[in-house]
Amino acid sequence: HTGSSVSDLFVNSFLDLAVVPTLGNNYEVWTVYIEDQSDLVKLADTAHLVFGPSHPLRRARHTCAMYFLYPTAFEENCIPTMETGEDNGAGMVDQKSFFRLMRAVERAGIPT
């Protein structure tokens, strides 16, 4: 069992079972934790600064962004969101803010 896709257990299992067999230990992981829609908006507004040319991730030959979140049209913390999946809707985020963040990170030069 690897937990929900927003858990540390899931991400660690993904790295151990999918990334390490392919890349070995020649990779870095930068984690950004999102609590709610406001975090998505803040990161989208500042992605060009946060992930700019001087960020340490730019030393890598290859970079990519991976999002272990579930975009939804439901309001945060509403009953349908809280009753969906494991962990009371953990990882459910506002779809418009989520896709805005993805576009901003891609514009900053980090493909999805």
Image (cartoon, grey):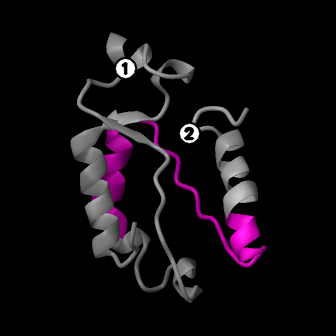
| 25 falls in the magenta region | yes
Of residues 19 and 48, the one nearer the viewer is 19
The mark that comes first in sequence, 2 or 1, is 2
Q: Name the residue under label 1.
A: 81
Residue 82, quarter of picture: top left
Q: Is residue 56 left or right of residue 17?
A: left
Q: Where is residue 86 in the image (x, y as percent from the top left)?
A: 55, 22
Residue at (31% x, 47% y) in the render: 98
Q: Say what secondary structure mark 2 lies in.
A: loop
Q: Is residue 78 something one can see in this rendering?
A: no
- Kind of residue at badge 1: Thr
Q: Quadrant of the C terminus?
A: bottom left
Count of marks overlaid on the render:
2
Q: Residues within 10 Å of mark 1 (few under 14, many from 20)?
A: some
Q: In this view, does 29 lie to the left or right of 58?
A: right
Q: Say what secondary structure mark 1 lies in.
A: helix
Placement of 11 over or under 82, stated as above or below: below
Q: Is residue 39 something one can see in this rendering?
A: yes
Residue 15, quarter of picture: bottom right
Report, in whole angstroms, how far the alpha carbon at label 2 lies from the one at label 1.
15 Å
Q: Position of residue 91 (x, y in %)?
A: 46, 35
Residue at (46% x, 65% y) in the render: 65
- What segment carries the magenta color? 19-47
Residue at (48% x, 59% y) in the render: 66
Q: Name the residue under label 2.
A: 6
Residue at (46% x, 23% y) in the render: 89
| 18 falls in the magenta region | no
Placement of 98 over or under 109, stated as above or below: above
